[in-house]
Amino acid sequence: MTALLTGTIMLSLLHGLIPSHWLPVLALKEKFGWEGIKTVRIAAMAALAHSLSTFLLGVFLGLFSLSLSENLHTYTRWVIPGLLIAIGFYFVIQHHRHHHFHIAEKQKLEKAGAAQVVTLLVFTMFLSPCLEIEAYFLMAGTHGWPMILTVGLLYTIVSVLGITFWVYLAQKGLHRFNWHRLEHNTGLVSGCILIVTGIISFFTH
């Protein structure tokens, strides 16, 4: 359980740092001349939409996992840790591909008017849930319904605060740095976190 919560926090923090989650907001700020407080507010709305879709998908996976764990001890003891490790290796291998809302999507948003851009941004973020964290919802299902909610709330709070905080800092010039390396290696770091969590789980059940 400790490994699950620690892994959730680490992935959520990393998730908040992903440039493609907050750089588009800064690009739109420059285009439409939004004030700082409005930019932060819009970033929070987009982050909430992104986290909500992740949370809903995670609850579904967690309940599915819960239904299996109540009947299959092997599932809890071996399958889930093995699945975390397998998913982790997948992200390590595929770390050069990123499935989140990509920075290039800002070009589509820039074609919309000021009245439409916020709705389009929020909707786009809702349609791109964080896939890495979903593995933890499967693991949470083996600990019961309260743990599913705990993982979901923990992820949502840390991610939303992280994304919003980075937008706040970036308005002070932080976005001028080259964030491509972090963006490119997010999958690699996420995969390693999942692998470590899976290995620890083998020895704590």
Image: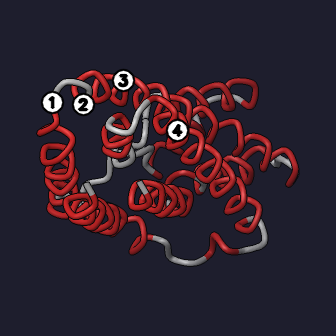
Direction from residue 148 to residue 131 in the image, left or right: left
Direction from residue 5 to residue 134 in the image, left or right: left
Image-quadrant location for residue 43: top right
Residue at 62 percent across and 29 percent down: it is: 112
Residue carrying label 4: 152
Q: Earlier in the sequence, mark 2 or mark 4?
A: 2
Foreground mark, 2 or 4? Answer: 2
Query: Residue 99: image x %, image y %?
Result: 33, 45
The crowd level at tag 2 (other Cα within 10 Å; few <14, some 14-19, many 20+) is many
**Which labelled disc corresponds to residue 72?**
1
Query: Residue 70: image x %, image y %?
Result: 26, 26
The crowd level at tag 4 (other Cα within 10 Å; few <14, some 14-19, many 20+) is many
**Which labelled disc corresponds to residue 63?**
3
Q: Earlier in the sequence, mark 3 or mark 1?
A: 3
Distance, label 1 to label 4, CA atoms, is 24 Å
Query: Residue 7: image x %, image y %?
Result: 42, 60
Foreground mark, 1 or 4? Answer: 1
Dot 2: what SS? helix
Foreground mark, 3 or 4? Answer: 3
CB of mark 1 within 8 Å of CB of mark 2? yes
Query: Residue 205: image x %, image y %?
Result: 25, 54
The correct choice, above or below, for 179 with respect to 187 in the image is below
Foreground mark, 2 or 3? Answer: 2
